[in-house]
Amino acid sequence: MSQLSLRLVVSGALLCALTAAPRAQRGGPPPTPKAQAAFDITGYWVSLVNEDWRYRMVTPPKGDVAGVPLNGAGRQAVQAWDAAKDEAAGESCRAYGAAGLLRQPGRLHITWTGEDALSIEADAGTQTRAIGFGGARGTPGTWQGVSTASWDRGDSPMARGGFFPGATARGGSLKIVTTGMKPGYLRRNGVPYSADAIMTEYFDRFDLPGGDALLVVSTEVADPTYLVTPFWTSTHFKRQRDAAGWNPRPCSTR
Amino acid sequence: MMRLRHAAALCAVATIGAVIGASGQAPAPPPPAPGFDLSGYWTAAMHEDALERGAGPELADYGGFPINEAGRLFALSYNASRVTLREHQCDGYVAPYAVRSIGNARGWEERDPHTQRLIAIHWYNQTFEGHRVIWMDGRPHPPAWAPHSWMGFSTGRFVGNALEVQTTHLKQGWLRRNGLPESDQATLVEFFVRHGDRLTHTSVITDPVYLAEFEVRTTDFFRQHTDHQTWLFACDDGEQILGRAPDNVPNYLFGENPFVGEFGGKYRIPAAAYLGGPETAYPEFEARVAGLTTADGASKLRPAAGAAVTSRAVNPEPSDDDIHVWPLRDNVYLLTGDRGNIVVQVGDEGTFVVDTGTGRLADKVIAAIRRLSERPIQFIANTNFRPEHTGGNVKLRAAGADPSVRGSFFALQFADAGVGATIMAQQNVQTRMVAAGRPAEGNPSDTFLEERRRTFHNGEPIEMFWQRNAVTDGDSLVHFRRADVIVAGDVFTTTQYPAIDLQNGGSVAGEIAALNDILKRTVYRHQEEGGTIVVPGHGYVCDEHEVVEYRDMLVIVRDRVRALVKNGATLDQVKAARVTADYDPRYGAATGPWTTDMFVEAVYRDLSRRK
């Protein structure tokens, strides 16, 4: 192909991509994150503690860190754990920070607080996370840190138009990135994460035959201070019709 | 220049499409793309349940599993030495447990080479070489009488950004490999979803036999960009303990598992908590743990007093008053629909039929056989005398008439030569049928007294093996040796407890010996599944694994009754002890021809008379 031909093809492709751009971008404001929601995440969700049961339903023994990719500093911190000391220091909520909260047995109440903001309340430890789309919400240096959300549809920019307008992916996940967390525990027995930790979560809803629905949260905690590799968990919740069992209670070190 | 024209044309088409879309005359929305590609090499992240999935679970740790009483009692009865039995050494993992295993996985797509339609997604687990095929082409699941496998039968579809998979036809296996069972009645719904190079797998297991609620697990994988290479997980069974009695299946009597307190002692958790149950998975349970007492734990170690549970299993036999044909192997077929299973071998030398059903649908049975072969029915073999296996004898024998055969050298001895099929059975079948006043033309005329009857028919060796005093005194196995199909009659069923008929010569020991005799003749193809096909008298098509579980069940129940008899228990006390509590949701019956009470009574009376 000659240079001229090549230029023409590239120009044509660009023109083509531009003209076939999504209609949503023409006229009027773009749909809000709430309107763009891939699924209904709102309502009450109860955790089913089917996994890591003895790490979650009871406080495991000191030093029992199986499965967590701790580095040397992390292991040292684990050995220094003292529940009574935490309590005396007013640090009872260390296991209820954002990176540990969803592993607590409990219920979530998720609501839209605006067209671009979500709230995740947990009855365990009476915690609330504020989550913003397009911009972070929350307060740095708190247990729940600051969180930014987006709808992750897994498609590439090239799939949004151009030659292959039909190739957009279906559905999507709610992706939340959280930083600025006050140092806390991944597990109740003092398995630590630091203020440098970055947590990335994907929320997916799966509807089951028979009418039940699950919310599965795939979580990655990256923490150069205490972890060798990112710590991965996936935590599941079952949808409730109402607030039955909702039981806000204070943080506990026991 | 041609390429340029082509690109311009593509652009024009796309532009026109976009303009039409913008003008409000919206075309139908484009078909959604498949959710994602599962292809590639995947490694499990072992950050959750790491010890369980790696080194292995702790004994009696069932916390968070929504098991029912039967599931817990089955697990507590489990003795890990059971895996030393030859038939258990290579047990594979069922699909949902295989995903939890420590090994690597590989996924790939199978597409039609011409249309590029997605036919199936394959998922291969290194551990036990579990190869799953997830059919994406819309095919239906097999009927209830089809065989079960470790991986089951899976169909998938893309829902949102997930691959949703529905699986049926699973074998009995583990929820957790410390004895926590998943039954062959379990079904599975899964969701695979990708977030970049991370894959989250969610499994939802529904098991009416051993679970009180569905059980959910989520498992994480990360994508590897190179081949793990270590894909084999070869297993062949061998002799691990010599001289062990063939009726020895390691198990613990109710309440006598010596390791039940180990986990609690190690982690300071009350037994009532870690012995599981649906309540242990919910947040409310957290506040209750500290208050649980020793008595609460002890109450979970034995069956609760109360009425027996009845089977929650799907009836694998069709009830639409029609006969359904299922190909077994080569020229051998299953005919189901007239209650007792019927097996047919077809060929140029005439049809060989094993059992004839109740006879209520005999005309339809004959019609189904005719569709398989126009040759006359040459032989009928009866595995026992019961009406649901011999009820069609008269009509099927008559259907074997061949006017071209006008008797033989033996016509004086065999009056029916040429006028019907020859009916073969062990002599006691004939004796029982005569005594019951059954029509003479339907009674076996070709009988044998000891060990076996053999014939070579349609190019295949066929043997009948007498099972002395199994469920009756006239049971036979019929083995098609080339097709490697064993027809077990009522020695083995998937629908009920062994119908041990003491009055007609049945016995517990003989039944256990008969089940072991099946196992002596079977060879599995891979990881304790496939290979020799075993057709039960009632139920779905099996291989040796189902026979092993059935044999284990009978031995374990016998051991429990024997212990009670040894301590002087009466029949009422044995029944009150609910010695079948862990098997009742699978096999139990309160009504019908063979109830749980009748089974327990038969075992009790048989063992009592041998004191």
Image (cartoon, rainbow, N blue to C red):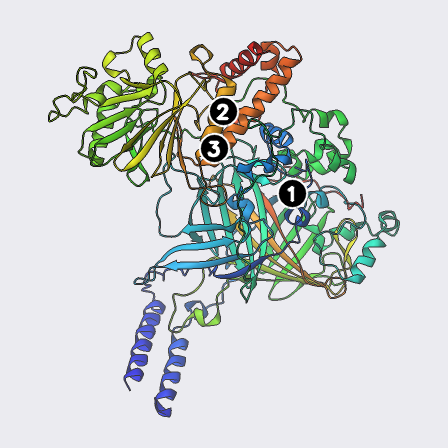
Subunit of mark 2? Answer: B
For the residue pair B342 and B215, the one nearer the viewer reads as: B342
Q: Give amino acid for label 3.
A: Leu
Subunit of mark 3? Answer: B
Q: Is residue A240 visible?
A: no
Mark 3 crowdedness (10 Å alpha carbons): few <14, some 14-19, many ≥20: many
Residue B319 place in picture, x, y as percent? 33, 27
In the displayed structure, does residue A164 sit left or right of residue B69? left
| Residue B582, image quadrant | top right
Subunit of mark 1? Answer: A
Residue B245 place in picture, x, y as percent? 58, 27
Which residue was labeled with disc 3? B519
For the residue pair A83 and A143, the one nearer the viewer reads as: A83
In the displayed structure, does residue B86 sit left or right of residue A74? left
**Secondary structure of residue under mark 1:** loop
Which residue was labeled with disc 1? A49
In the displayed structure, does residue A66 sit left or right of residue B114? right
Q: Please tell me which of labels 3 and 2 falls first in the chain.
A: 2
| Residue B557, image quadrant | top right
Q: Is residue B226 visible?
A: yes
In the displayed structure, does residue A214 sit left or right of residue B397? right
Which residue was labeled with disc 2? B513
Q: CA distance from mark 3 to mark 1?
A: 40 Å
Question: At 72% from the left edge and 60% from the top edge, which residue is drawn?
Answer: A145
Mark 1 crowdedness (10 Å alpha carbons): few <14, some 14-19, many ≥20: many
Residue B190 place in picture, x, y as percent? 50, 47
Residue B404 place in picture, x, y as percent? 11, 27
